[in-house]
Image (spheres, rainbow, N blue to C red):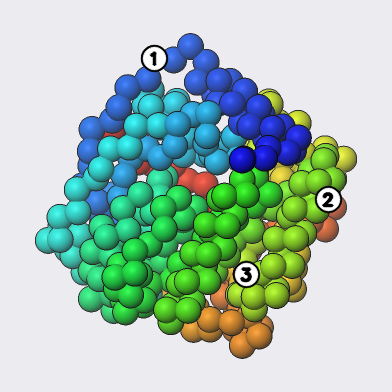
Amino acid sequence: MKVVTSADQQIRDAVAKSSRAMIGDRELHAPAPATIRAGRAGGLPFDSLTSDLYLGCLPATQICYGSCFAARGAFDAGYDFGVRVENVLDAAVFTADLRALPANQRFLRNGWNSDASWNWPKALELARLVRDSDRCPVFVTKHFRPIDPDTLAGLVAAGAELRVSVSAFDTPNQARQRRAGLLAFRAAGGVAVPIVMSTLYADDHLNDRQDELVDWIGREDLPGAENSLRIPPHLPVSRLLDHDRVGVLDGSGDLWAGRLYGDRLPVPTITSVPADYPGLPWRYRSALDRDQLEAWRLDPVRTHEEVMSGKRLEKPQQCGVSRAWEENR
């Protein structure tokens, strides 16, 4: 029997109301598939990016944190974010983009407007092409679907770095699957980084759930990272936040708390690192070289203390950039 806590019900209700607020009276339709590209040569905003495997991701009532920037971009462009349209991986086109990248671009990240977990075998195809260019493939994922053993072994062999976003928003089943996926990837010899999407909640139960998640990462000796949720104040989901303990992001006006866990989640977010980031060489938190991590923290997510100082602060430049939908207008 599935047990739903009052906190879980609050999240469901807030996400559903926020999605309705974002869509308004727009009539949505599915986009046309696109060819998967890499870097600025492929028309992307940064050389660190590849196109996603899909356009679209989750139905509106289930979008991540009730405020997913990619979903907002899709709705604004008139596209139904809940319809997943598979993009085309043309090896020749993709390889040409990789050859055009600057020599110092040592990694490529996938998973900024959708999620690779909808098709892990295709993610492996992309990872192998990236690795053949002598670069590190990094997947930022919510791990909606588990990785089958053969594909998992292939991703590890390709030197892929798996970064799994986790939060107090996760349902118990989602939390179990994401935790299991992180441990399975490391057990197979890969680098698995949990990214805690953090904030400060009005409901202490959600703050406790977030703290327990960070405790679990510490107990499992995983190299954790942290990103600060950014939620527009006009969306109903913002009511879940403790407004006395979050700040306002310059430019967008989004509410955010900044990094809360400092030394406990020391790995820089992938949007913070420089072009020559080679991939994380350590699979365990206890093995991390803290000086090297700080050297890689080029454009950091601000700390909670900085956010609450009253200074005008912006998000990292490469964080929350939506372009895939614009290409289909």
Q: Residues within 10 Å of mark 2 (few under 14, many from 20)?
A: some
The residue beneath circle 3 is 224
Kind of residue at disc 2? Met
Q: Which mark is residue 84?
A: none
Q: Residue at x 52, y 36 (%)?
A: 63
Disc 3 to disc 2, C-alpha distance:
23 Å
Any part of residue 96 in sight: yes
Asked if 109 appears above or below 160 in the picture, the reply is: above
Which numbered mark, 3 or 2, is in the foreground of this view?
3
Along the viewing direction, whichever of 141 and 251 lies nearer the viewer: 141
SS at mark 2 in the image: loop
SS at mark 1 in the image: loop
**Rendering quarter of residue 55:** top left
Disc 1 to disc 2, C-alpha distance:
39 Å
Callout 3 touching callout 2 (CB < 8 Å): no
Precedes in sequence: disc 3 or disc 2: 3
Residue at the far top in the pictured view? 25
**Rendering quarter of residue 322:** top left
Asked if 114 appears above or below 66 in the picture, the reply is: below
Kind of residue at disc 3? Gly
**Residue 183 percent location from the top left of the image:** 53, 71
The residue beneath circle 2 is 308
Q: Is residue 154 left or right of residue 60?
A: left
